[in-house]
Image (cartoon, rainbow, N blue to C red):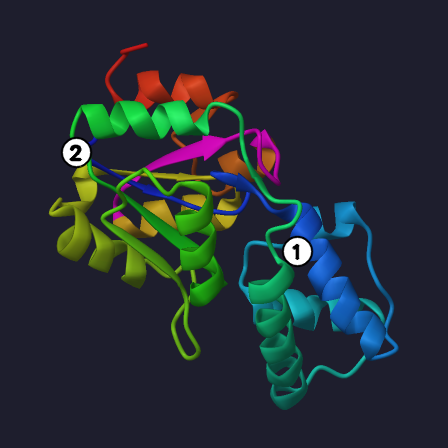
Amino acid sequence: MIPRGVIFDLDGTLLDTLDDIRAVVNEILSEEGLDTHDRETYRLEVGRGLENLLRRLLQRQREEAPDERVDALAARVRSLYLMEGDRRTRPYEGIGEVLDRLSERSVPVAVLSNKPNDSAVAAVRRFFPHHPFSCIRGAEPGSVPKPAPDAALEIAAGCLGCAPREVAFVGDTAVDMRTAVAAGMLPVGVLWGFRDSAELESGGAAVLVGRPPELIGVLLGGER
């Protein structure tokens, strides 16, 4: 299938954000007198939304994680991340070329992330200022995060103007792949992000891509 539209995950797919996520969340945890965590821990835990990340980190140290505590920590992380969350972040090498080629072929693209919405929008606008995205959607308070297909389906219909079966969903985690499967989209897993091939396959990946330039062939029907 040659897709008529593409939805990209953000963290681990378009941008390497792991060191900024680690730095910001660790700073808030440290202010609370809680344990901080290494890069590998964040690599395995991110992708399910900020509240889920914080809840799992608290549970790792057998701390109570009621909703009100998690929500308060999440608000502080969001605020700090908006100010300091792009110091170490970089686009993956070759991603700019992929976006250029899609634009040249008039293939509409969007971003769907479980990252807080303000941070997702700010990151895309900073690191890809010249690339047209039909829409950028992150997590809002009260919204249903991936792997629920709701937002992906809304983006396909409202932003891309495509039927779900005409859309490729590109991401680096099983959460992304399950989102694509639930939405009836093509699940394309990338191996340069935060998870490995086994996780992506367990989530239902139909295609695995090792390097960004390979995406051009997948998304544009064999074109290089």
Is 99 drawn above or below residue 30 in the view shown?
Answer: above
Q: Residue at x 39, y 70 (%)?
A: 144
Which is more foreground, mark 2 or mark 1? 1
Q: Which residues are magenta?
A: 184-197
Viewer-closest of 1 and 126: 126
Indicate which disc residue 62 carries.
none
Locate residue 45: give its quadrant: bottom right
Q: Callout 2: few (<14), some (14-19), or many (20+) C-alpha neighbours within 10 Å?
A: many
Image quadrant occupied by the N terminus: top left
Q: Sequence-wise, which precedes: disc 2 or disc 1? A: 2
Instruction: Give amino acid for label 1.
Output: Ile
Would you say residue 1 is visible in this rendering?
no
Q: Position of residue 90 (x, y in %)?
A: 57, 38
Locate residue 141: give its quadrant: bottom left
Is 150 drawn above or below residue 90 in the view shown?
Answer: below
> From the viewer's perspective, is 6 left or right of 92?
left
Q: Secondary structure at mark 2?
A: loop
Indicate which disc residue 4 carries.
2
Q: Position of residue 19 (x, y in %)?
A: 70, 48
Which residue position holds label 1? Answer: 21
> From the viewer's perspective, is 75 left or right of 41?
left
Q: Position of residue 87 (x, y in %)?
A: 65, 49
Is 125 drawn above or below residue 168 in the view shown?
Answer: below
